[in-house]
Amino acid sequence: MEKSIEVHNLTVSYHSKPVLWDVDFSLPTGKIVGIVGPNGSGKTTMLKTIMGLMKPDSGYTEIFGQPLDKVRERVSYVPQRESVDWDFPADVMDVVLMGRYRKNNLFRRISKEDKRIATEALEKVNLLEFAHRQISQLSGGQQQRVFIARSLAQQADIYLMDEPFVGVDAATEDAILQLLREMKNQGKTVVIVHHDLQTANEYFDHIVLLNTRLVAAGPKEEVFTKELLQEAYGGRLTVLSKLGDLISTEEFPLREPEFKENKPEK
Amino acid sequence: MDPIFLKVLIGTTLLASSAAVVGAFSYLKGQSLVGDAIAHALLPGVVLAFLLGDGRNPIFLIVGALISGLIAHYGIGYIQSRTKLKSDTAVSLVLSTFFGFGIMLMSLIQRSGQGQQAGLERYLLGKAAAITMDDVYVFSALAVLLMVGVGLFYKGFQLMTFNEDFASAIGLPVPLIRFTFTVLTVLAITIGIQTVGVVLMAALLITPSAAARAWTKSLPTMLLLAAVFAASSAITGTYISSAIPKMPTGPWVVLVLALFGFGSLIFAPEKGWLAKRRRALANQKKTVQENVLKLLYQQEERSEVSVVLSTENMLSIRAMQPEKLRNALRDLKRRLLVVEHGSGYALTELGRSEGRRVVRLHRLWELYLTERLGMAADHIHPGAETMEHVITPEIEELLVKELGNPELDPHQSPIPYEEA
């Protein structure tokens, strides 16, 4: 089966402290994948690095076997709902239309086709009647659905979503889940950052268990075992976090500059 | 019309409105102070351009200011990314260093006795009256450039301000968008400080947007309104300063702008102080009216026949301000919720239903407090007294559903539903 995402020996740091340490896995296509781990385990960093929003100290990520820039229009990203200011002067339609922005239409007006696609996306998340509602007046669940509609409007093949179930009501949670399953049935890949173990087993087909280092990645039956969960949630490895502190405070580089580990040329 | 006056009028209006449109994005990004910092940081560039070249050439000065402003802007960004300093610290660090350096250069010129130094002072406090015809041409060109720039980059600026990570994720050239925005901001400030000066420049960038935001929830409308507010302030300020001898233009422009700002905070619909006050008053009235209906309903509930109560009766049952009670009864009569019977008042069928609703909400909320929040039955009454006026039909429905269509409240009083 074709790989949707490949993460190769990835190390990423924040303020020169490693948040992801030599993480290496690949994901199948056409599945709902959960990136699961405790708070501060590097889940969001993982997503941001795949989306090119954070630069890795070493290693690389690939989507459909290619660097992100080659396949950008096939990838959609849903940031955490709380990462934006919902008091921004915009209505629901304005935000969903942002999903139609592209590098090559940046200076062009929004087309009728864009509006049609955005309307369809709104319909799918059941927010059509709110199209001209101010985003500041939406509930948390509605805001999350606006973000998902924006993502649908991108018409991508892979969807990366950061905590889409946080702060939403039960009805929205069901609606989102149903939507994700529909997307899967159409052959799309959905990767979701999720921190709630209770629901993870029910939601996902494939799980990446993360706690700064990779604990396990694979079909949920293989990963969702008591031993592995305990390993992921049983606190950080003392040696790793001690080394991380040392690297950060003593200004060591994470990789020696002479050491090159690039992707082998094909 | 006096040609000098006209020159000043055109110059200030153009730069005020174009600065307002660019400043809107800084305002929305919550970076109001960055404009202030850049305005201060332009000074060394301006003075150096003055020292190195022809001090009267506006283009030369603008280039100097642009370079200085860009260095300051990227300096702030660099400090933020490389240290753990908070952003306001980085901003003030750059602001004071650049401004101090600029002032030092200025005093050097002064000591060397170059006569031109008089022309430099206008950058500190602004001197609109000194605008030359050359300046007007340059300002017009820049103002057009700014408007066109914002128009062209509208989508980019909008997304950069709302959700920069998403802009990067979909592959928009975010560094280019940011660079363009910075250049436009620095240009706006460069022409702005010639009228109002370094110190007042932040007002020209931010106040129009703050005022406009209070009136609208749409970004294009907000940009337009900000430009209109800024232009009106510029025109009014210029008139005032020309009507009164020896009055500076810049401070007047900024003062009029402040009037727009405060006026908007007071008068704007929804968010304005007056609108809030009006809502609070309306809710106070609603509360008293609902309390009267509740009182009448509860008396009926107790005696099981319809009752007529005088205002004195009501006051003896529930403490209320007599004045407010009389007003409430007058309003209730007008809304056909009560009728007058001799010297007393009785519920109409409509009023009875309203009174029943208030009592129902009160008892539902008491039940919710004991069942869901685990509160003791003798602690729940005060909260319910408030909530009975707040709960909307939507929330009522949720309450009924969540409590499973309850029959009795925690005090064993029946919860009165509307008969089907």
Image: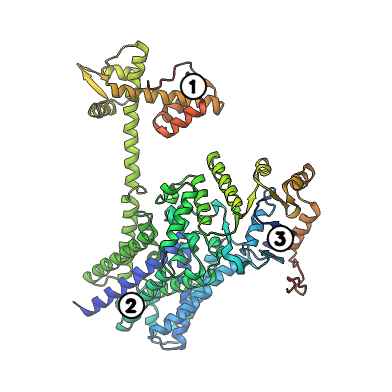
Specify the subunit that label 2 lies on: B
Going 44% across and 33% down the picture, which residue do you hit?
B395
Q: What residue is shown with label 3?
A: A17
Residues under numbered marks 3 and 1 in contact, where contact means CB atoms less than 8 Å apart? no
Q: Secondary structure at mark 2?
A: helix
Residue A111 or A52: which is nearer the viewer? A111
Residue A16 in picture, x, y percent from top left = 70, 63
Q: Nearer the viewer, mark 3 or mark 1?
A: 1
Q: Which mark is residue B406?
A: 1
Q: Is residue A166 visible?
A: no
Label whose residue precedes the other's in the sequence (1 or 2) = 2
Q: Residues within 10 Å of mark 2 (few under 14, many from 20)?
A: some
Q: Which mark is residue B140?
A: 2
Up the image or down, B99 lies above or below A248; here it is below
The residues bearing labels 3 and 1 have C-alpha atoms spaced at a distance of 56 Å
Going 48% across and 17% down the picture, which residue do you hit?
B411
Residues under numbered marks 1 and 2 in contact, where contact means CB atoms less than 8 Å apart? no
**Amino acid type, callout 2:** Ser
Q: Are marks 1 and 2 on the same chain?
A: yes
Q: Residues within 10 Å of mark 3 (few under 14, many from 20)?
A: some
**Amino acid type, callout 1:** Pro
Q: Secondary structure at mark 3?
A: strand
Up the image or down, A65 lies above or below B114; here it is above
